[in-house]
Amino acid sequence: MSEPLRHSDGPLLRVERLSLALPEGADRLYAVDNVSYDLSASEILCIVGESGSGKSMTANAIMGLLPTGVHASNGRALFDGQDLLTMNEISHRALRGRRIGMIFQEPMTALNPLMRVGEQIAEVFEAHGLLTARARKEKALALLEEVRLPNPQAALRAYPFELSGGQRQRVMIAMALALEPELLIADEPTTALDVTTQAQILHLVKDLQQRHGMAVMFITHDFGVVAEIADRVCVMREGKIVEMGSAREVLDNPQHDYTRALIEAIPGDAVPPSRSETQEKPLLSVKGLDKVYRSSGGWFQPKREVVALDAIDFTLDKGETLGVVGESGSGKSTLGRCIVGLNTPDNGEIRLNGIDLRALAGRELREHRRRIQMVFQDPYASLNPRIRVGMAIAQGPIANGVTKAEAMQQARDLLATVGLDASAAERYPHEFSGGQRQRIGIARALALNPELIVADEAVSALDVSIQAQVLKLLDDLKQELDLSLLFITHDLRVAAQICDRLIVMQKGKIVEHGSARQIFLSPQHPYTCELLAAIPGRAPHAAPAEVAAGAV
Amino acid sequence: MSFFKRFAQNRGALVGLVILGLVVLLAICAPFLYPDSPWRMVQRPFLAPGEVAGFPLGTDTMGRDVAAGLAHGAWVSLLIGLISTVVALAIGVPLGALAGYFGGRIDDALMRFTEFFQTIPNFALAIVLVAIMEPTTFSIVLAIAIVSWPPVARLVRGEFLSIKHREYVEAARLVGQTHRDIIIKQILPNTMSPVIVLASLMVATAILLESSLSFLGLGDPDTMSWGYMIGAARTVMRQAWWLSVIPGVAILLTVLALNLVGEGLDDALNPQLARAR
Amino acid sequence: MPYVSLILSRIGKAVIVLLAILVFNFFLIHAAPGDPAAVMAGEAGATDQQFLEDLRERFGLDQSLPVQLWRYMSGVVQLDFGYSYRRQMPVLDLILARLPATLLLTGAAFVISLTFGIIAGTLAAMRAKRPSGSIIMGLSLLFYATPLYWVAMMAVLVFSVMLDWLPAYGYSTVGAGYTGLTHVGDVAMHLILPALTLGLFFMAVYTRMTRTSMLSISQQDFVKTARAKGLAPGVIQRRHILRNALLPIITLAGLQAGQMVGGAVLTETVFAWPGIGRLMYESLMQRDYNLLLGIFFFCALLVILFNMFTDVIYRLADPRIKQSAA
């Protein structure tokens, strides 16, 4: 394939004083305000920001994929000397896919569910009128091999639903690279993936970039990713650039407060401090927990079995924070739900203060169950949108016999405890931010005076700077109210912040457990080592090990 | 933006509301404007509209005042439409809620039941029911309600199935709320929006159903309904076209208005930014 | 063969529904006010006491309910749907004679409504912001709100009475003795108005659904991916948006089957089209309940076949559905 000739010298992409105006009624005037940056060939620029920073918007503008209502009010975006914003649609379309490629965040929905993978890749060639049908198929196969998809022949004929998230992301990368574009825009491509898969994909992108000499714009919210692959960094906040420079400079010597706050909030290099061993008796003791999910087949369909929990044994001492770490499919969520009572295990015992909860029933069971409460993951789904916040907190005590007036007063006190104003009790959930809603969720969990709180990915859906605040709140509450915490997460960096001990789960089994510090400093099990190595931005290391069954 | 403001933004919905208001007004005023029974023969038959003063819409095959028939028919249509919808909701909402919430065998049973009703052609069933029960307002309302409840149950079941797994419902279970409280206080308020929209469309469908039944001669013989008027005019289309056109336009406007209002409610209750309408 | 199990389970379900309908029919006769024998005899023999006695004996109406039910069901299995006293013919024969006409009418209406509905809906979606899009949606709302029988009557009034372009009533020109191609052409001429009328309402339904479906699919991620590849908008509409948007339409078409059969009753009545819909109307007027219930059974049968058909099409179109009993 002939290389498209460059028309001008200088940086491949130059964004000059770009402002993108939002439609009326939005919470600010500009999605992106007076933003300028350059990108040259063979360079990886990371654009970092939290939600609402506008980091994806410039990329959308460059590709001509702005959502309805958003338009460029000022500035230019020069690609090889030509302004993308004023170009006519036909010329722009000729660039898309050919000289500028893009990959998106959500691999599960980014492919047409009704078309085979091979066809979708061949489409890229078709869009630009290149090659014969047979040659396209061959090229598609070659691309799938290049992105290291296991069994490329089969993948070619597969439908998207037959592939995993990581595999679909590789297909996306193959599509974006098909015509060897000079510029690749990656919009949070690893955010929705497991940490080990993320490491593989990051490595793949870096590798391909070096081989093809592409310029890469990598958009992310994770400073760990920056440390892993960036040459240069651009930090954005609320539509403006607050800091820009080489990756080394910005990471070692951040100038702006916001940058510093982001880097320090959840450091990739964190190692948990050594904590004194508590000599208390175990509060929670779990033995031999099993759970298997069986999908009943139809008349002619084989039954399917998924082992969610396999002979789980562990104890949780009073006043301790025990972290449960694992990727998707590890069973950590199922474990949390079984302990709280939302799921029923097939076998095993769960003892709270020595009493086996599974042997109880009816009122006794309820009595004991209320001592274990849960904080959920999604701040936008964990509160009933039609019920006022104070009432949402008070509903628990009311259901357990407390009078309404007393419960409401208690709710107001709890809101103050979690750092919100008591007047919040009269407002509806949609009036609060994600971090605030999570605080309300914590207040609700505290309303019944539990002894143990299970936090199921309680901070995973929050921005990094907010995560640190909520974690601190949990830690403080633990000390104040003499709570114990079972903290479920997929992110080891977060676990390092507050966990005393850790258990590592893989495919329903506990593969390692010990004090948090010990696990970070001298991990024993290969999977634990893999998890630690996959943390983006941790000390430089070799290519991440491909998981035994092939790339996921 | 409040609900009313959002509703008012949809011009179609406003037009619908106005038309609906006029129809309701007509129905309410019928006993005053036309105190006599519309079955009374008051003039020469086949008078064209406006031919004789005091009969702006003419008279029909038996010399009855078309305008009187129209006014009383409005009352009949709205009444039957409204009541049958309410009955269908009373059957469908609880069944759908229980099936969606408890799942398992209750859900299976309900699904079989609604599949059965789905397979039977609605209108044919209504015909059979009314024919065998003898046409009265009661049997018509019952028949319409019986053919109309499955979509309600399906909708409510679907909503309950999806909301049941939301985290705030799980939280309610954890703090010990009873099933009854969870269904009524947690889930039901969140399902009201689509049900309200569906209800407005169901009233429209009920009016169409009732008029179709009357057209075929299955209406309550004591009530003058728009459908009946059209049915009676079928054989005399050549001589008196207005007898079939006028009541038809009335039905058309009423059903149209209800659909517009329904769409307006949908927009107002489910605001979504940048939604193409 | 992956579809064998699917078809078997579908047939199984269908049989259950049909049996349920039979039971339902049976109880309806007995639930009607008055004497079941009088109901069955209809107008014909309602006043003749001896006749009613004969009926009772012949149909074992003096026996217990379960026994009667059994006799009824076994009769149906042997394809004996009862006897129409009014017309002095077995119900089954009457129905089978008229069935083809209804199949022709509903088939034509189905094809017309689906084809033009999808085209109109696609156009409306592509021109969503422009006046032409609004006009299409406005018209479809109008057709959706209009009573079917009224449209039929207006069509007769305008196209037949006033303009005399098309024949108003019947299946073919009576007494003309056409054969072969001319006969086909003649039937086609008679078919136009009824098929268009019946199809109009459903055209509106499919237009609205297609438009909504396409607009919502165009917001999905994979459409953004398609744009990022540099594909032309026409290709995106066709290959990515429309293909995915059609899935819910197929499901809807299946659900609408019942409505369409019901609509056929009204259409056939107005146009005097000799199908089972009109037969239903006639049996109503003549209070011939045996016939009425037999037709009802066949209507349900039609809907079931229809649903099976659309179900298979859906499974062919969507590779995500596993090919097994569900």
Image (spheres, rainbow, N blue to C red):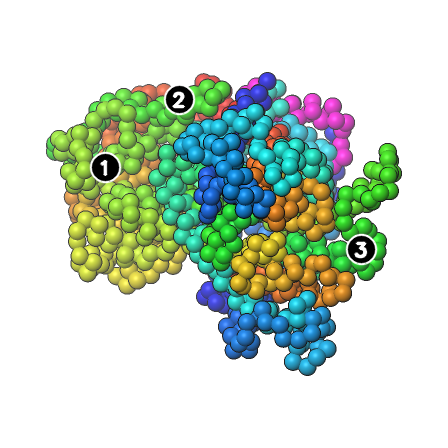
Please tell me whether residue A141 belongs to the stretch shown in magenta: yes
Residue at numbered disc 1: A321
State which chain disc 2 sits on.
Answer: A
Identify residue type, mark 3: Ser
State which chain disc 3 sits on.
Answer: C
Residue B160 placement (x, y as % from top left): 40, 45
Q: Nearer the viewer, residue A518 or A470?
A: A470
Residue C151 placement (x, y as % from top left): 69, 56
Q: Is residue A546 above or below residue B194?
A: above
Residue at numbered disc 3: C160
| Label ID, residue A305 | 2
Q: Quadrant of residue C180?
A: top right
Q: Residues within 10 Å of mark 3 (few under 14, many from 20)?
A: some
**Mark closer to the chain start, 2 or 1:** 2
Please tell me whether residue B76 belongs to the stretch shown in magenta: no
Front of the two marks 2 and 1: 2
Asked if residue A228 can be seen in this view, the reply is no
Front of the two marks 2 and 3: 3
**Residue for point 64% across, 37% down:** C88
Q: Quadrant of residue B63?
A: bottom right
* Disc 2 + disc 3, Cβ < 8 Å: no
**Residue for point 20% across, 58% down:** A404
**Magenta highlight: main SS:** helix
Please tell me if label 2 and label 1 are on a single chain.
yes
